[in-house]
């Protein structure tokens, strides 16, 4: 894997981690509000899990291409 590709993947991981963290904050605030729409909260939680899976997959790709 070329250095540029590694940098691109790392930047994408950073973006996804930031989005994941932001969603965590939003979910925390919405969960404290009993008047919130449960469906919206479930969708946000699902998106957060998707982000986590994508982050792990990208991190795995980086580890596979690092020489031992």
Image: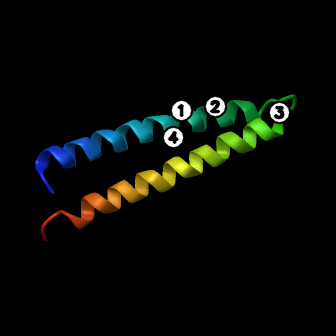
Identify the residue shown where x is 35% and y is 39%. 14
Is the residue under label 1 in contact with that under label 2 (CB below 8 Å)?
Answer: yes
Is the residue under label 4 in contact with that under label 2 (CB below 8 Å)?
Answer: no
Left or right of residue 36, residue 22 in this image? left
* Quadrant of res 23: top right
Report how far apart the C-alphas of labels 3 and 1 lie in the structure.
19 Å
Is the residue under label 1 in contact with that under label 4 (CB below 8 Å)?
Answer: yes
The one of 25 and 67 positioned closer to us in this rendering: 67
Left or right of residue 28, residue 10 in this image? left
Mark 2 or mark 4: name the one nearer the start of the chain. Answer: 4
**Which residue is at the far right?**
35
Residue tagged 1: 22
Report how far apart the C-alphas of labels 2 and 4 lie in the structure.
10 Å
Name the mark nearer the viewer: 3 or 1: 3
Residue tagged 3: 37
Residue tagged 4: 20
Question: What is the x, y in percent for residue 24?
Answer: 59, 38
Residue tagged 2: 26
Identify the residue shown where x is 82% and y is 30%. 36
């Amino acid at each position: 894997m070329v250095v540029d590709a590694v940098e691109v993947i790392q930047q994408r991981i950073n973006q996804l981690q930031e989005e994941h963290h932001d969603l965590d904050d939003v979910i925390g605030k919405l969960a404290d509000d009993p008047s919130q729409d449960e469906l919206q909260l479930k969708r946000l939680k699902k998106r957060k899990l998707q982000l986590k899976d994508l982050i792990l997959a990208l991190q795995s790709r980086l580890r596979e291409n690092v020489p031992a």
